[in-house]
Amino acid sequence: MPSTIIPCLRYHRAVEAIDFLCKAFDFQAHAVFRHAHDDSVVEHAQLTYGGGMVMLGSVREDTPFARHMVQPDEVMGRETQCACVTVTGDLRAHYERAKAAGALIVEEYAEKHQGGAGYAARDPEGHLWYFGTYDPWADA
């Protein structure tokens, strides 16, 4: 099996983020593990989209890994990376769904010169997402 890269994100309100990502961006909740003593804390979640996956959990200051990450609201909304999701279905409908669900569109839907179409959006906590039809594996 080839190697797999899975983006991992943290959210202040992870339960609400999971609901938003599923509603707005059509992710599917594959697994969601909540804290045994606090149902509002997500220890670990796996959301799938087609053959891809993102993992996420609640922001927690009491973990060794936490000191290596910041949230967009802590750095004036900036990101050092974004998840790029290849949409195999109707991208225009995906875009309209995201807008209707309240995603902040930061790059409008457009046909791209390198092929395909795409748009970029932020989720409610400021994480940046790019959705497009360009499939870099198609020419491999």
Image (cartoon, rainbow, N blue to C red):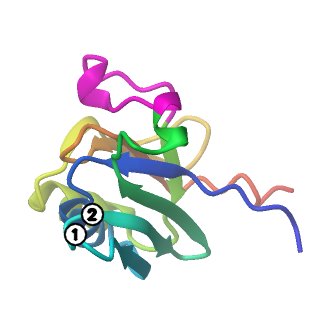
Q: Is residue 73 magenta?
A: yes
Give, as a single range, the part of the protein colored magenta. 67-81
Q: Foreground mark, 1 or 2? A: 1
User: Where's residue 113, x and y in %?
Assistant: 55, 35
Q: Are marks 1 and 2 in contact (CB under 8 Å)?
A: yes
**Vertically, is 22 above or below 138?**
below
User: Where's residue 98, x and y in %?
Assistant: 22, 59
Residue 113: assigned label? none
Q: Which residue is mark 1?
A: 38
Residue at 47% over, 45% down: 63
**Vertically, is 16 above or below 82?**
below
User: Where's residue 130, x and y in %?
Assistant: 43, 45
> What amino acid does circle 1 point to?
Asp
Helix, strand or loop at mark 1: loop
| Nearest the eye: 65 or 50 | 65
Helix, strand or loop at mark 2: loop
